[in-house]
Image (spheres, rainbow, N blue to C red):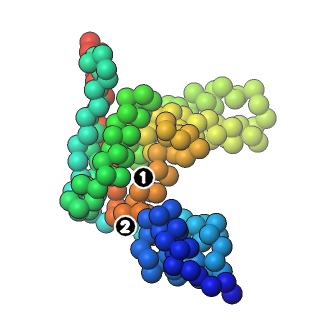
Amino acid sequence: MAEITAQAVNEFRKKTGLGLMECKKLLTEAGGDLAKAETLAKERGLKQAELRSGRAAKAGRVEAYIHHDSKSGVLLELNCETDFVARNDEFKQLAKDLALHVMAVNPKYVRREDVPEEAVAEQKRIFMSQVADKPVAIQEKIATGKIDAWYAESVLMDQPFIRDDSKSVKDVIMGVNARTGENISVARFARFIVGEER
């Protein structure tokens, strides 16, 4: 087994933002392999983040994004569990990035649960009519794929993140969640454009 040096622990800590003891434990488990330890940290971090998602998030911040022409903007409420995290630079940056994302991509809903059942049923009806000429056995499968693509256009959490489209907005939030150790969630947003009816 490889010896875990203080330098390796410090390097891993800078990369992940985890505590010293957690870094040493993960590096030991990974046999000193930095890449393997990072994978372990991600796996555990995301598992812990998912467990935290049920905890109450009553602190946070409201972020405002005003486009440079002052004709459009976004207000977004991002919640966390404590004021300590709400004042954290990474949390503040996440709020800014999410407000910019909402302005640029224009989601209609925060999460899938927010989409009215009638809207989903109407989309499914439209997609089923589009695939009526396909074999019956695959119509449902194609329509389900189209519904998932529609969610990725309409639902903030399902959208590819504008700063890194290899990740969804949910993945980005879960990453910050894992690093801060708190439940972080978007409560709501409003997008405004001068002269546009709501």
Residue 118 seen in this snapshot? no
Give the residue at the far bottom of this rendering.
1
Q: CA distance from mark 1 to mark 2?
A: 12 Å
Give the residue at the far top of this rendering.
195
Q: Secondary structure at mark 2?
A: loop
**9 shown above or below 14:** below
Q: Which residue is mark 1?
A: 173
87, 52: nearer the viewer: 87
The amino acid marked with disc number 1 is: Ile
- Position in image of residue 183 (x %, y %): 34, 61
At x 38%, y 40%, the residue is 97
At x 53%, y 74%, the residue is 7
Q: Which residue is mark 2?
A: 181
138, 104: nearer the viewer: 104
- Position in image of residue 167 (x %, y %): 55, 46
Q: Are marks 1 and 2 in contact (CB under 8 Å)?
A: no
**173 shown above or below 108:** below
Q: How many marks?
A: 2
Q: Secondary structure at mark 1?
A: helix
- Position in image of residue 87 (x %, y %): 24, 54
